[in-house]
């Protein structure tokens, strides 16, 4: 039981990173990027490709070596580049034309399938792992946790802290908030909106790639792994509120723990009642139901207003 | 060759019906409903459960006639569409889009996991094809194709009447300028949910027509690529808010899609990669149309509010 809570925390960290990537785009450009989940997958697969070239090496405590860290950094850079190029080619003209939101959603939806088919074409439908072989788990009185999973959690906390510091304590981050709040006023006070959009896309790319690589490290690589997490990421974004970093982190942990621990509890409940429902297949349905509940009760998010007024 | 044409007619008619429903929601009212695959699957499974013969291990086998199956499909799909509308339609545009995508994924998961309902991934086979014996056993696709075309034409003429009525003009006005319509005293939410339910019912019927042509369905018959992405391209290519364009788009795109399957055999690519290449091409076409020709190949002019000033402020651009 406690093991599934830990699984939930790890999943929650991964969802947070993917969700923050989407959240930044919602904050600045006001549309939910469907492609977010697929970018997440692409980032993980790019790191996988580079891991085949770069020797893994070894680290004392973890089952991965410095090669994975290098691949992660390359994947971050490439994803930032890919997302910026796509943003400049596809979304910048839409923003310039002042197009309705429908265009953004349609383009994102088309992009989802384009990227998914590219992933299938290059890497195929098989499951993949960064690390072959059995990992050693640490035991803390009945709880199994691998050092890699501890790394994922700690790294996520550090990344969230860096992003938080960047957004609220640097000039560029404050300029970003100003642009999100009122683009015209920000433009008048000397902030270049185009530069802000580029910065945000780069940050989103870095966060998304990190989330994907962490998913591959903690679980495994699948071509539709990002798409199945998409509802959970949207839940984190909506519940966290627009661009509220700590809010998104909290909501990500909530949905991660609900998906892992909640399904276990419900499974035991249904088994006792006598209903024959296999709950492990319904993880994304739970995320969807929670999303609907949040949308009908608190569409502005629970954490809204604590950090950013809009 | 003739059999091939009959197959294209059957599938084209089924896709036309789905596309007409999608076009009503998107082209006229401006609802970006991404649960097309879920609604079509709900319709298809309902019709199959109502009309098929009894089988072990799942509900169904009521042996009802085809028409009852269609009505059941429409009712179930309409109820599902109405529920998601009640939950999210009063919110922003984006929340509706993401929750409908989630609804489609949920219906897929449900059909995959609940064996008593849908027989899981093994699917349901032996679905009867109505009128299959009418023109002799060799021409069963032709007689079914004619039936599907008749259903499609009935829906088309009904829709043409509806969208030319005051109700349809209000829908177009909502799409072009929501605030203006609200100011004229129309209940925007009420009109939107009506359009959503009607469109969902039509999608359900389309899914049912598809299922009865296929003869065997499983959750993979209604994947998001085949049943959401392709109708999207059909609407975009045919021009949104244009019923004739939707039908033409559906037939042209489906012919191209199935012909590409024939020619793909000659290409030096392994057969497992072909579906992904087709998806890639379709996605690039959609993005290219949006980028360079946003009104679609056969566009529709602004019908209700033709003022050019509203273009700069709100969501009043034509698509």
Image: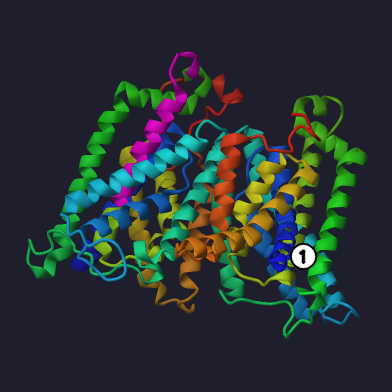
Q: Residue at x 83, y 65 (%)?
A: A73
Q: Position of residue A174 (x, y in %)?
A: 87, 36
Q: Could you tell me which quadrant the N terminus of chain A lies in?
A: bottom right
Q: Residue at x 7, y 67 (%)?
A: B136
Q: Position of residue B184 (x, y in %)?
A: 45, 13
Q: Position of residue A183 (x, y in %)?
A: 76, 29
A269 to the left or right of A174: left
Q: Residues within 10 Å of mark 1 (few under 14, many from 20)?
A: many
Q: Secondary structure at mark 1?
A: helix
Q: Which residues are magenta?
A: B182-206
B262 to the left or right of A70: left
Asked whether residue B88 is in view, the answer is: yes
Q: Residue B271 occupies which quadrant of the picture?
A: bottom left
B248 to the left or right of A199: left
Q: Residue A178 occupies which quadrant of the picture?
A: top right
In the picture of the structure, the residue carrying the numbered disc 1 is A75
Q: Does A215 sit above or below residue A109?
A: below
B177 is within the stretch colored magenta = no
Which chain contains the residue that carries disc 1?
Answer: A
Q: In terms of depth relative to the viewer, which is nearer, A232 or A1?
A: A1
Q: Residue A137 occupies which quadrant of the picture?
A: bottom right
B195 is within the stretch colored magenta = yes
Q: In terms of depth relative to the viewer, which is nearer, A247 or A53?
A: A247
């Amino acid at each position: 039981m406690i093991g599934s809570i830990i699984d939930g925390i790890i999943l929650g960290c991964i969802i947070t990173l993917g969700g923050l990537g989407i959240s930044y785009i919602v904050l600045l450009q006001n549309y939910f990027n469907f492609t977010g989940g697929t970018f997440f997958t692409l980032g993980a697969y790019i790191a996988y490709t580079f891991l085949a070239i770069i020797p893994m090496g070894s680290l004392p405590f973890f089952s991965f070596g410095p090669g994975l860290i290098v691949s992660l950094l390359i994947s971050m850079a490439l994803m930032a580049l890919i997302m910026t190029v796509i943003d400049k080619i596809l979304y910048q003209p839409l923003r310039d034309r002042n197009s309705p939101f429908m265009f953004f959603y349609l383009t994102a939806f088309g992009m989802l399938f384009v990227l998914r088919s590219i992933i299938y074409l290059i890497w195929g439908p098989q499951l993949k792992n960064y690390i072959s072989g059995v990992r050693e788990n640490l035991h803390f009185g009945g709880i199994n946790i691998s050092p890699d999973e501890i790394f994922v959690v700690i790294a996520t906390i550090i990344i969230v802290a860096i992003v938080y510091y960047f957004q609220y304590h640097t000039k560029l981050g404050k300029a970003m908030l100003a642009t999100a709040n009122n683009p015209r006023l920000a433009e008048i006070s000397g902030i270049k909106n185009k530069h802000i959009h580029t910065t945000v896309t780069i940050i989103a790319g870095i966060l998304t790639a990190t989330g994907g690589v962490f998913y591959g490290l903690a679980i495994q690589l699948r071509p539709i792994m990002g798409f199945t997490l998409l509802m959970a990421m949207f839940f984190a974004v909506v519940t966290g509120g627009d661009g509220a970093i700590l809010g998104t982190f909290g909501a990500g942990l909530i949905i991660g723990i609900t998906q892992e621990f909640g399904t276990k509890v419900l499974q035991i409940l249904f088994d006792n009642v006598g209903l024959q429902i296999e709950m492990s297949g319904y993880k994304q349905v739970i995320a969807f139901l929670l999303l609907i509940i949040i949308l009908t009760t608190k569409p502005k998010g629970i954490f809204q207003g604590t950090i950013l007024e809009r | 060759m003739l059999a091939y044409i009959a197959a294209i007619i059957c599938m084209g008619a089924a896709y036309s019906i789905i596309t007409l429903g999608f076009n009503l929601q998107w082209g006229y009212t401006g609802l970006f409903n991404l649960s097309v695959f879920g609604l079509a699957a709900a319709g298809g499974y309902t019709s199959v459960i109502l009309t098929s013969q009894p089988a072990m291990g799942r509900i169904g086998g009521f042996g009802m006639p085809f028409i009852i199956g269609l009505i059941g499909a429409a009712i179930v799909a309409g109820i599902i569409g109405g529920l998601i509308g009640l939950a999210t339609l009063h919110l922003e545009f984006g929340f509706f889009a993401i929750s409908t995508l989630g609804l489609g994924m949920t219906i897929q998961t449900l059909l995959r996991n609940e064996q008593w309902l849908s027989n899981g991934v093994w699917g349901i086979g032996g679905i009867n094809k109505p009128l299959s014996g009418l023109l002799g056993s060799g021409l069963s696709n032709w007689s079914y194709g004619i039936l599907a075309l008749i259903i499609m034409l009935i829906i088309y003429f009904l829709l043409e009447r509806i969208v030319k009525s005051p109700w349809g003009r209000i829908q177009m006005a909502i799409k072009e300028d929501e605030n203006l319509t609200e100011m004229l005293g129309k209940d925007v939410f009420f009109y939107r949910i009506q359009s959503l339910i009607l469109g969902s019912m039509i999608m359900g019927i389309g899914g049912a027509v598809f299922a009865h042509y296929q003869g065997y369905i499983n959750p993979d018959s209604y994947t998001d690529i085949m049943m959401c992405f392709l109708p999207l391209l059909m609407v975009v290519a045919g021009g949104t808010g244009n019923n004739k364009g939707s039908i033409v788009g559906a037939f042209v795109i489906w012919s191209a899609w199935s012909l590409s399957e024939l020619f793909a055999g000659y290409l030096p690519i392994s057969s497992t990669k072909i579906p992904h290449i087709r998806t890639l091409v379709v996605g690039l076409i959609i993005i290219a149309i949006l980028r360079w020709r946003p009104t679609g190949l056969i566009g529709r002019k602004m019908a209700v509010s033709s003022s050019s000033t509203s273009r700069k402020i709100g969501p009043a651009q034509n698509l």
